[in-house]
Image (cartoon, rainbow, N blue to C red):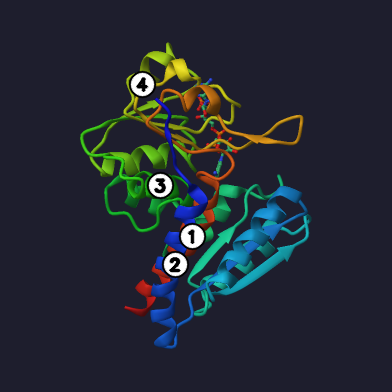
Amino acid sequence: MTARIIDGKAIAQEVRAEWKLRADALKARGITPGLAVIIVGEDPASKVYVANKVKACAELGLHSVHVALPADTSETALLAKIAELNADPKIHGLLVQLPVPKHINSDKVLNAISPEKDVDGFHPLNVGALATGNMRFAPCTPYGALILLQKSGVEIEGKHAVVVGRSNIVGKPMALLLLQHNATVTICTSKTSDLAKHTRDADILVVATGKPRMITGDMIKPGAAVIDVGINRMADGKLCGDVDFESAKEVAGWITPVPGGVGPMTITMLVANTVQSAERAAA
Ligand code: NDP
């Protein structure tokens, strides 16, 4: 079997167009959805992510505010900036790009963001809302992975979904989203014994480990939908996923490439969460 390639770029464009219509409808009522992104320090990768987030907002005609603070910004000063943006009615989505410098407590930062504006979905209240089936904001990467499955026509209800990885930003929320869509969900971690036994049983396999090409074709059930969240920069400068694409595509029914799979969906869902937040504020 040769898998159908899930084209994340094309699906992201389609989803952005859908959300642009919703943003335009708000703008017609005099409300422009607004996103504020705070970055502390000079981490080059973080700067690229932030620039891309701001650019995506501009492309959809959203209001965006980019706050760049020096690396030696105190925790108190950062919390004060968050409080100011929490109170700004033009801002519907607010995030602090992680990681923050070591002298700042990231939990305190995430807790300080208003849950109503927490478009990353990392505030404990929003994590709890997702866990109890009352989702307000789903974290953008797993939300994007879910949309890729849905837009590709992959059936989720009643299927066995295996998520490899249990981080707070990808693995755990991914498992919760799949559970909410009535999949039977298994979560595997670095402590799982006989990982392949579990992955071979997956109708839907989502991999988010940060371990380049660790899932090979022989670990995949024929016909499975494989979502590769991993982004790894190799010594030759090229990107690869956590799935060995070449062997996996011969066995899977659907597969996301890296790059061009989950990656383009993450920022798309950030924009979606921002528009949705503005819709709620306007209701
Ligand atoms: P973390 O390092 O936070 O978590 C990795 C998870 O993988 C952990 O739960 C770990 O288990 C598990 N793991 C590691 N090795 C193994 C193994 N051999 N077998 C089974 N499980 C294993 O990573 P993230 O979740 O933040 O990111 C994962 C990947 O996704 C990375 O490549 C990252 O770059 C990418 N990513 C991509 C995004 C996108 O926009 N496409 C956004 C965010 C991340 P344990 O808990 O036991 O340590």
Question: Which of pointers 3 and 1 lies earlier in the amino acid sequence?
Answer: 1
The reply to whether discs 1 and 2 touch (Cβ–Cβ < 8 Å) is yes
Q: Is residue 64 above or below residue 243?
A: below
Quarter holding ligand 1: top right
Amino acid on which disc 1 is placed = Gln
Locate the N terminus and report the quarter of the image it occupies.
Answer: top left
The residues tagged by marks 3 and 1 sit, at their Cα atoms, a distance apart of 12 Å
Q: Residue at x 49, y 52 (%)?
A: 265
Amino acid on which disc 2 is placed = Ala
The residues tagged by marks 1 and 4 sit, at their Cα atoms, a distance apart of 30 Å
Does the image show residue 192?
A: no
The residues tagged by marks 3 and 4 sit, at their Cα atoms, a distance apart of 19 Å
Q: Determine the image quadrant of residue 81.
A: bottom right
The reply to whether discs 3 and 1 touch (Cβ–Cβ < 8 Å) is no
**Residue at image mark 4:** 221
The residues tagged by marks 1 and 2 sit, at their Cα atoms, a distance apart of 6 Å
Amino acid on which disc 4 is placed = Lys
Q: Assess mark 2: CB under 8 A from ligand 1?
A: no
Q: Is the residue marked by circle 2 packed among few (<14), some (14-19), or many (20+) residues within 10 Å?
A: some
**Residue at image mark 2:** 17
Q: Residue at x 60, y 37 (%)?
A: 231
Locate the C terminus and report the quarter of the image it occupies.
Answer: bottom left
Question: Which of pointers 2 and 4 lies earlier in the amino acid sequence?
Answer: 2
**Residue at image mark 1:** 13
- The mark found on residue 148 in the picture is 3
The image shows residue 37 at horizontal and vertical percentages of: 61, 64
Q: Residue at x 40, y 57 (%)?
A: 137
The residues tagged by marks 2 and 3 sit, at their Cα atoms, a distance apart of 15 Å
Disc 3 is placed on an element classified as helix
Amino acid on which disc 3 is placed = Leu
The reply to whether discs 1 and 4 touch (Cβ–Cβ < 8 Å) is no
